[in-house]
Amino acid sequence: MEQQSKNPLHGKRLDAILEELVEYYQGFEELGKQINIKCFTDNPSINSSLKFLRKTDWARTKVESLYLYVLRQKKKEESKNRK
């Protein structure tokens, strides 16, 4: 149980992850440059992307990895701004 509480993905819904990534990259265009998959580059929407990601494990893994990277970047930015 302790292991799960340290996992930043634990309890995080896929739609929340996707919305946070779209916000961080200021839209699907930049997100599509980070992860080049059709649901981000060809007529993207949250709903169509969620549908694809829920069915496609490799794509979901890429999104989750990018999300973890973004969390680390945000932490770095926060600590830089505090100094």
Image (cartoon, rainbow, N blue to C red):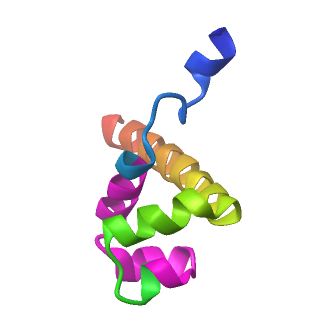
The part of the image, by quadrant, that contains residue 27 is bottom left
Q: In the image as oriented, which residue stretches furthest toward the bottom? A: 42
The verdict on residue 27 being magenta is yes
Q: Position of residue 49 (x, y in %)?
A: 43, 69
Nearer to the camera, 58 or 62? 58
Nearer to the camera, 11 or 72? 11
Query: Vertical placement of 77 versus 59: above or below?
Result: above
Query: Vertical placement of 13 versus 24: above or below?
Result: above
- Which quadrant is the N terminus positioned in? top right
Q: Position of residue 76 (x, y in %)?
A: 47, 44
The verdict on residue 75 being magenta is no
Q: Residue at x 58, y 52 (%)?
A: 64
Magenta span: chief secondary structure = helix
The part of the image, by quadrant, that contains residue 75 is top left
Q: Residue at x 42, y 41 (%)?
A: 13
Query: Vertical placement of 9 versus 24: above or below?
Result: above
Q: Position of residue 21 (x, y in %)?
A: 40, 59
Query: For this view, does 40 lie left or right of residue 59?
Result: left
Look at the image and give the residue range highlighted in magenta: 17-39
Q: Position of residue 69 (x, y in %)?
A: 57, 52
The part of the image, by quadrant, that contains residue 4 is top right
Q: Residue at x 36, y 36 (%)?
A: 83
Q: In the image as oriented, which residue stretches furthest toward the top? A: 2
Query: For this view, does 27 lie left or right of residue 51?
Result: left
